Amino acid sequence: MPIPVIDFSKLNGEERATTMAQIANGCEEWGFFQLVNHGIPVDLLERVKKLSSECYKIEREEEFFKNSTPVKRLKELVDTKNGDKLENIDWEDVFLISDDYEWPQKTPGFRETMMEYRSELKKLAEKLMEVMDENLGIPKGYIKKALNGGNNEKAFFGTKVSHYPACPHPEMVTGLRAHTDAGGIILLFQDDEVDGLEILKDGKWIDVQPLANSIVINTGDQIEVLSNGRYKSVWHRVNAKSNGTRRSIASFYNPSYNATIAPTPQLVEEENPTVNQLGYPKFAFGDYMSIYTEQKFLPKEPRFQAVRAV
């Protein structure tokens, strides 16, 4: 069962209504979908692929296999020959980039290309927010304004550059443990050859199929709250693989830490003013992140309950 693939260019033509409905379905029934013809130039995506792989090879790979905790712990487990699986660790090399973060220094062109890519991706995220606003029947710009809340603050737009190296014992470790994403909208540029990403749909794990030059979209916990549960954040995981290194570049359009997040008033049932007392709380995103950091791989519902008490 493949996740939905949506031609984003058709928003601007005769098939706009159909495309809007497809995006609504992707948000409401799946929480994950892939966009093609999204407006990000193919040549830019090809440069991102090339330079991300070079960065990993030049600056990351040797250190991962020589000194990383996952490699050391997997070797120890293999040596015990007891058939167990590694817990509480991921077979992942990862670093985060943002405009004001320190960038990799040894890969020519990496920063310039990634800044160009991030600029294009941020514009795509904001277009998607407007589509979500329209589909939800709330004022245009509402979601963007909510994520950019706080005094003189802006939403955080970060990019997580991950590689999941070929694993000699993929049955003994997880690439990335199952979780939902804490923030707003996530835009993923994943490997188009090595698979491994799965989502939980109707109680079953299904593949997010590799598709060249697509952008995978998923909604995080804050979109679930803003939509009053119409758009759910979805459990997903990455399996370790032995057939190659999987590239995964996930960008997060997250609220500012002082942004106040709560269900959009128009989406709370007016005829029953008590409905949200047992539903989603109102909270500062920074408070939520303090809880999420400790509970990322646990069920999300207790996080909402815990932040209510802050």
Image (spheres, rainbow, N blue to C red):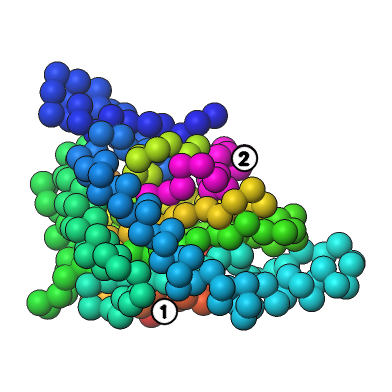
Q: Which residues are magenta?
A: 189-208
Q: Determine the CA span between mark 1 and mark 2.
A: 30 Å
In the rendered image, is residue 3 in sight?
yes
On the rendered structure, is 82 left or right of 152?
A: right
Asked if residue 197 lies in the magenta stretch, the reply is yes
Q: Quadrant of residue 7?
A: top left
Percent position of residue 127, x then y: 17, 45
Pointer 1 with pointer 2, Cβ within 8 A: no
In the rendered image, is residue 230 in sight?
no
Q: Nearer the viewer, residue 109 or 232?
A: 109
Question: Up-down: is 104 above or below 9?
Answer: below
Q: Dot 2: few (<14), some (14–19), or many (≥20) neighbours within 10 Å? A: few
On the rendered structure, is 208 left or right of 110?
A: right
Asked if residue 59 lies in the magenta stretch, the reply is no
Disc ID at residue 290: 1
- Tell me the residue at 46%/65% (across/down): 56
